[in-house]
Image (cartoon, rainbow, N blue to C red):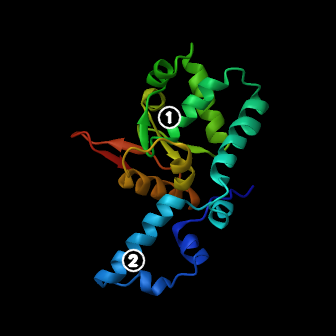
Amino acid sequence: TINLFPFSFSEYVTWRKLDRNQLLGTTPELRARRNRVLLDYLEQGGIPEALRYPDLGVLRTLYDDVLHRDIVTRHQIVDTRALRDLAFRLMSNPAGLVSFSHLKQQIGVGSINTIKAHVQHLEDSWLILTSHLHDASIKRQQLAPKKIHGIDTGLMRAVGARFTPDTGHFLENMVHIALHRAGYSPYYAVTQDNHEVDN
């Protein structure tokens, strides 16, 4: 099995035929250019077809196809509203902590198992990746909130709600995907003074 991820930032730079050496420069002009390219990547993402045809709505179509064909049809889901509402909330919250019990209340489904199943379907379909709390106790890991990352920042921007640029969370999302691409399974931890640390 080969997991095929969207373009990494490095691959995105190659696809745009940019000079890597210039992007590594330290002058104010080159730093500004590097930051501009990075922000473009966070906005556009790394799905090749969407980059090639930016005006065709490829990301929205891909998202709808995954929800309908890969999840609803495959798992014979009747309450598609709950699935779509859940997916929208998760895609609107890059690198966010979520509690299944809170999601159950917000979406209005009858069972927390429905939320767990839908999250698993979204993860199996490669729309999201889930991180657990780093803890020696499996039970505490299971009960703790989960951290959700989208598989592509461009996809999240295309289908989720955006009220602020949220650059920090999208950068965290990008790093998380890079770790997965490198073969790691990242966890998160919470320090005594309530700061999050991804590891």
Q: Which residue is mark 1?
A: 89
Asked if residue 178 shows in the view, the reply is no
Q: Position of residue 194 (x, y in %)?
A: 25, 39
Q: Which residue is mark 2?
A: 33
Q: Is residue 108 above or below residue 22?
A: above
Q: Secondary structure at mark 1?
A: helix
Q: Residue at x 43, y 53 (%)?
A: 170
Q: CA distance from mark 2 to mark 1?
A: 33 Å
Picture mark count:
2
User: Cβ–Cβ below 8 Å for labels 2 and 1?
Assistant: no
Q: Amino acid at mark 2?
A: Arg
Q: Dot 1: few (<14), some (14–19), or many (≥20) neighbours within 10 Å?
A: some
Query: Which circle's residue, 2 or 1, is located before the other in the chain?
Result: 2
Q: Residue at x 73, y 35 (%)?
A: 68
Q: Is residue 163 above or below residue 27?
A: above
Instruction: Kindly give the residue lying farthest to the left in the view shown.
Output: 193
Q: Quick one: 163 or 88, which is closer to the camera?
A: 163
